[in-house]
Image: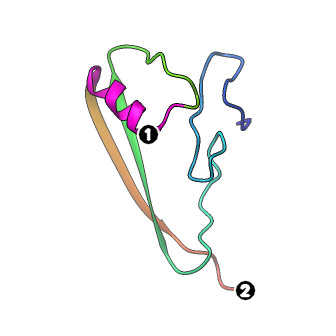
Amino acid sequence: MPKKESLPDGTRQGRNDFGKPGYGGPCPPSGTHRYVFELYALDAMLNLPATASRRQIEQAIQEHHLSRATLTGTYKRAQR
């Protein structure tokens, strides 16, 4: 998946924890880290820019939220 704010099909990617568009995958500096993914079913497309903040996205979702799923996983780097 290209790490761009907008893709040719109209999909928009938000910014990650590093302030860049797209998903970077798990990369903990040390130890085991927990990763939480949330998937929302909405009744409408959100008209938000890729630069929208998490708070802006959460506010927009509230008006169109049908269902939600959460996946929590842990990851640690392999010992070399």
Residue 63 point in image, percent of width and height: 27, 21
Q: Which residue is mark 2?
A: 80
- Closer-to-camera residue (57/70): 57
Could you tell me which quadrant the N terminus lies in? top right
Label 1 Cα crowd, 10 Å radius (few <14 / some 14-19 / many 20+): few
Q: Tell me the element at label 2.
A: loop
Residue 60 lies, with reference to residue 70, above or below; the image says above
Task: Please name the predominant secondary structure of the magenta segment in the image.
Answer: helix
Name the amino acid type tagged 2. Arg
Which residue is pictured at 47% across the width and 16% down the height? Answer: 47
> Along the horizontal axis of the image, is 35 left or right of 16?
left
User: Counting residues from the N terminus, which is met first, the one under dot 1 or under dot 2?
Assistant: 1
Q: Is residue 17 left or right of residue 7?
A: left
Give the x, y percent position of residue 15: 59, 41
Amino acid at pointer 1: Arg
Position of 72 with respect to 53 (left or right) is: left
Q: Position of residue 12 (x, y in %)?
A: 59, 25
Q: Is residue 74 left or right of residue 12?
A: left
Residue at image position (56%, 52%) is 17
Q: Quadrant of the C terminus?
A: bottom right
**Where are the magenta residues, as a range?**
52-65
Residue drawn at x 59%, y 80% as measured from the top left:
30
Q: Nearer the viewer, residue 20 or 31?
A: 20
What x and y, as percent, mark residue 42? 34, 22
**In terms of secondary structure, where does tag 1 sit?**
helix
Image quarter for residue 34? Answer: bottom left
Viewer-proximal residue, 46 or 49?
49
Q: Does 37 appear in magenta? A: no
Query: Disc 1 and disc 2: Cα gap in Å?
Result: 36 Å
- Residue 54 image label: 1
Residue count near mark 2 (Cα–Cα under 10 Å), binned few <14, some 14–19, many ≥20: few
Nearer the observer: mark 1 or 2; the answer is 1
